[in-house]
Image: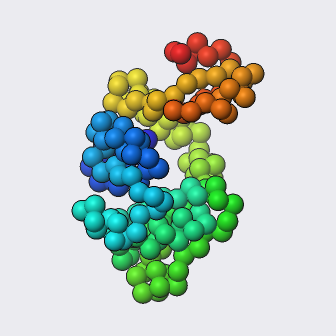
Amino acid sequence: LVSALASRMGLRTINAVRSQEAADTLRAEGLENAHYFRGVPSPDELAHAGLPPPRLALSCVAGYAAHAAAAALAPGGTLVVYGGMSRRPASVSVSALVFRDVSVRGFWLSAWMALRGPAAVHALLSEVADLYAAGVFSAPPHRVFPLGDYAAALSHTGSKAILCMGDASDLGE
């Protein structure tokens, strides 16, 4: 969704994904800068792929992935950490901070929503929902499972697994 929104705003993105299949799928959906890298791409890997150093990196992993993302940023770039899936602190080298002027910020969606208030959040979510309804955006490949089938959802491969607390038919499945 981030890449689709950025594209709609005229911004270029680099989508570093975990498999060649995922990169091919994203390219087929119009995200031309989807690339498969083994982990967070290094500056050399980006250059080899013909990509400029990004000015913004988003990390939901933190840990060493944040360190690698900061290393790949252009001078003056910003790393935004919005999760900690590695369960490790986000580490950034002194050279990235001091010599390349990289900034690090945190983002917590709940706090952002509280700051904006319910009306603004509702308006934003309605706008995104309208874009999905109009076919501008599409959901990634997925399969919906009733909550009681959580074991099947955990073993599901090949697409996203979504657990539904209500009737899955409500989601058009």
Please give the name of the residue rendered at 40% of the width and 82% of the height, measured from the top-left corner.
Answer: 100
Q: Residue 140 placed where, x, y %?
A: 45, 33
Looking at the picture, tell me which residue is in the foreground, 51 or 73: 51
Quarter-wise, where is residue 157 in the image? top right
Please give the name of the residue rendered at 41% of the width and 42% of the height, measured from the top-left corner.
Answer: 22
Looking at the picture, tell me which residue is in the foreground, 67 or 131: 67
Looking at the picture, tell me which residue is in the foreground, 84 or 137: 84
Image-based side of 9 in relation to 146, left or right: left
Q: Is residue 105 above or below residue 129?
A: below
Q: Residue 66 placed where, x, y %?
A: 53, 66
Image-based side of 128 in relation to 13, left or right: right
Q: Residue 80 placed where, x, y %?
A: 51, 62
Quarter-wise, where is residue 131 in the image? top left
Q: Is residue 141 above or below residue 93?
A: above
Q: Is residue 39 above or below residue 162?
A: below
Specify whether residue 96 is in view.
yes
Which image quarter is the N terminus in?
top left
The extreme left residue here reads 50
Specify whether residue 4 is in view.
no
Q: Is residue 13 above or below residue 157?
A: below
Please give the name of the residue rendered at 75% of the width and 21% of the height, measured from the top-left corner.
Answer: 148
Q: Residue 81 placed where, x, y %?
A: 55, 61
Looking at the picture, tell me which residue is in the foreground, 64 or 60: 64
The image shows a total of numbered marks equal to: 0
Please give the name of the residue rendered at 40% of the width and 40% of the height, measured from the top-left corner.
Answer: 21
Image-based side of 12 in relation to 93, left or right: left
